[in-house]
Amino acid sequence: GKCREELVKRNAPCPWCRTEMVWQTVFGVLDGLKGATRGFREGQHDELANLMAMWQEYEMCRTKSDISLFAREMATDAAVVARLEGALAQSSGWLRDTAGLWIRFYSLYADGEAELSQVDGERLRRSVEASIEAFERDHGGHPDFVGAMYQQAAVAVLS
């Protein structure tokens, strides 16, 4: 709760369960994921799909509370939000190629595992719908995208 938020804000070690090195590693992963989400553009299919692999690896190594906290951080980061809103406005294929992230974050929100505002939750829902609509429109232009979309959706839902 509040204790963890203060630790995150100050990047301080927890006297009971965390060392500063662990926090730095966690922040490194999160910052890398956020940067990649903002930085990759439509057409960088492999790099964009790999974002889900980054999240999956992170999720396998962290506690449920960490996962919820950092999913909320991703879903509310101002630059990530701006990227999502821009992609939604343009019906961008970028959403199709990053579908796994938005499906996973929306699933966490819908299941009550990630505390988000209704506005943030609605943005994730719209992102999921738009990513599926983009896929249905053109299947990414290559048969490999059928398997890639299935994998991203299945991993996101089964995590």
Image (cartoon, rainbow, N blue to C red):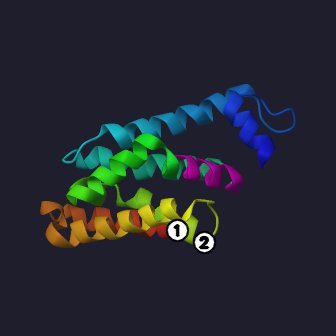
Q: Is residue 84 left or right of residue 158?
A: left
Residue 71 point in image, percent of width and height: 56, 52
Q: Which residue is the extreme one toward the right?
A: 16
Q: Answer above or below: position of 27 versus 125.
A: above
Report the span colored magenta: 64-73
User: Image quarter for residue 8?
Assistant: top right
Residue 52 point in image, percent of width and height: 42, 52
User: Image quarter for residue 134?
Assistant: bottom left
Q: Answer above or below: position of 93 versus 34.
A: below
Nearer to us in this view, 64 or 123: 123
Residue 137 point in image, percent of width and height: 16, 71
CA distance for labels 2 and 1: 6 Å
Residue at x-position 27% and y-position 53%: 87
Disc 2 crowd, CA 10 A, few/some/many (<14, 14-19, 20+): few
Q: Is residue 48 left or right of residue 90?
A: right
Residue for badge 2: 111
Q: Is residue 92 left or right of residue 101?
A: left
Nearer to us in this view, 147 or 97: 97
Q: Answer above or below: position of 67 versus 20.
A: below
- What predominant SS class does the magenta segment belong to? helix
Can you see residue 159?
no
Residue for badge 1: 107
Disc 1 crowd, CA 10 A, few/some/many (<14, 14-19, 20+): many
- Mark 2 lies on a secondary structure that is loop
Can you see residue 24?
yes
Q: Is residue 132 magenta?
A: no
Say which amino acid is labelled 2. Asp
Image quadrant holding the C terminus, namely: bottom right
